[in-house]
Amino acid sequence: MGSGPASAIVKDRSIPKIGIFDATMLVMGGIVGAGIFSNPAVVANMVHSGVLMMIVWTIGGVIALAGAFVYAELAARHPARGGHYAYMRDAFHPAIAFMFGWAILLVVQTGGIAAVSVIFARYFLAVVPLPISETTVAVLALALLTGINCANLRAGNKTQSLFMILKVVAIVAIIGCGVAIMAHGTASESMSGTMPVHPFSALAAAFTPVMFAYGGWQTASFAAADMRDPARDLSRAMLYGVLGVVALYLAVNAVFLLALGADGLASTVTPAAAVVDHVSSRMHIGAEVMAGCIALSTFGFLSQGMFATPRVYQAMAADGLFFKAIARISPRSHTPTVAIALQGTLCAIVAASGSYESIMSYVTSVDFIFYGLAALALFVFRARDRERTSVVGYTVPGHPWTTAFFMIASWIVVGTTIYSDPRHSLIGIAALSLGVPTYFIWMRLRKADPSIAVEALD
């Protein structure tokens, strides 16, 4: 499926220019956003124990690494335009792929990008106090990134790589504060905290902010067809990127505990600022550094989202599952300009409405459904292509157990998220469910008027 003339035409127009370094930065950029600067405090407030906090972040890292193994083989075995979307289409059915695209369009990516743009605006104005509103800054940032990504493929991926490097520098600076704390012997004496009354319920609730912070590595697969050698580069980038993020996240959480202790971490909403204040004697420097770190981190996340996600809508349109204009690749910039403009416009509209509350629950509850389906897709591809396994180039270590672990863990995360926040989780799932009738309505419209979509052959 998805190998008809439309797909071939789009592929011929595209000029892949993304190498393994930029692909690794794309993976890391899809994961590292504002979450690592704020979610450790949320987790600490839920578990109240330094030991449990490190356990849940470590388990989250193990799940993310298992996911990287799965996506690395999927990338090597099936390096198709649209990445995750193509896995859903070719392993199951175009309807499942449509629902994935529907989910990221309405919930996962558009909602996440819009919400993060508001956070970027908030902290940008804290560093650069201009006489304009947060909404204006958020919309301008989205417009800028939309323009950059429409203008040139190289400009888009180099912009997101630059900001990913800046995010790593900001995180390394926080880790450096931890080294200074140890050197001067000023570590908190309450690192362990207290065990919660109901530890299992606390851990279940903590998985939502942890996995929200770890989620997003799959977005690099959206741009697989724009890479020089997706089968090789994307599979390696998945492993390098996720391993790098896990190491950074565990180190940052250890620094937070070292500086603030479990109770101190639970009592702040700006842990990075509190750590810098702990090290520095200058008043307010912590707040300034925190604002700068989050501004850089969130802008990098926005850059990655605006670069990678529109490739899914372009792939959907190339398959005849979206308006044919979305499938167009600009012959000048070699980018899906209409798809990027659609993403930017929708994000700007949501950002203008301006709410970030409970984004973790309704994004995570939907996102991890499709993570589990990606693992199931690998089982399907392996069953179909047994003779190709030895020549794929990369295979999941410990398959089928590693793959099954990731699949089950993903759906457990969905369950724990619904359990801890049923209202907002079910809003996300309800939005996803609307994709079912929408798919069949679209197919009927396409049958009645074929001119609205690219004619794709299964």
Image: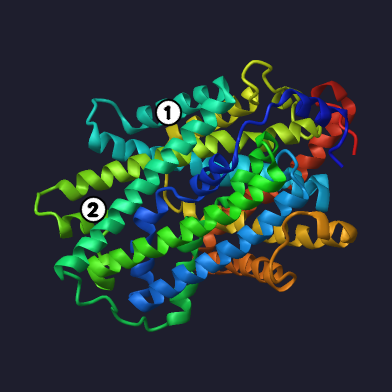
In the picture, the disc for residue 52 is none
Q: Earlier in the sequence, mark 1 or mark 2?
A: 1
Q: Residue at x 59, y 28 (%)?
A: 340
Residue 152 rendering spot, x and y as whole percentages: 57, 22
The three-letter amino acid code for the residue at tag 2 is Ala
- Vertically, is 71 above or below 442? below
Location of the C terminus by quadrant is: top right
Percent of width and height locating residue 264: 23, 68
Q: Amino acid at mark 1?
A: Val
**Residue at (48%, 28%) from the top-left corner?**
145
Please identify the quarter of the rendering in which residue 123 is found: top left
**For mark 2, what is the residue?**
273
Residue drawn at (27%, 43%) of the image: 291
- Res 21 → quadrant: top right
Q: Which residue is mark 1?
A: 139
Query: Image quarter for residue 374?
Result: bottom right
Spatial CA distance of label 1 from label 2 is: 26 Å
Looking at the picture, does residue 416 appear above or below residue 175? below
Instruction: Name the foreground residue: 274 vs 419.
Output: 274
Instruction: Say what secondary structure mark 2 lies in.
Output: helix
Q: Residue at x 38, y 70 (%)?
A: 46
Which residue lies most toward the top here? 332
x then y, percent, for residue 53: 39, 72
Judge from the rendering whether residue 135 lies leftward or rightward of residue 214; answer left or right. Answer: left
Up the image or down, 451 lies above or below 119; here it is above
Asked whether 107 or 113 is in front, the reply is 113
Q: Could one spot residue 381 in this view of the protein?
A: no
Is 228 in front, or is 67? Answer: 228
**Going by the image, does 378 lie left or right of 133?**
right
Q: How is the image coloured?
A: rainbow
Q: Residues within 10 Å of mark 1 (few under 14, many from 20)?
A: many
| Quadrant in the picture for the N terminus | top right
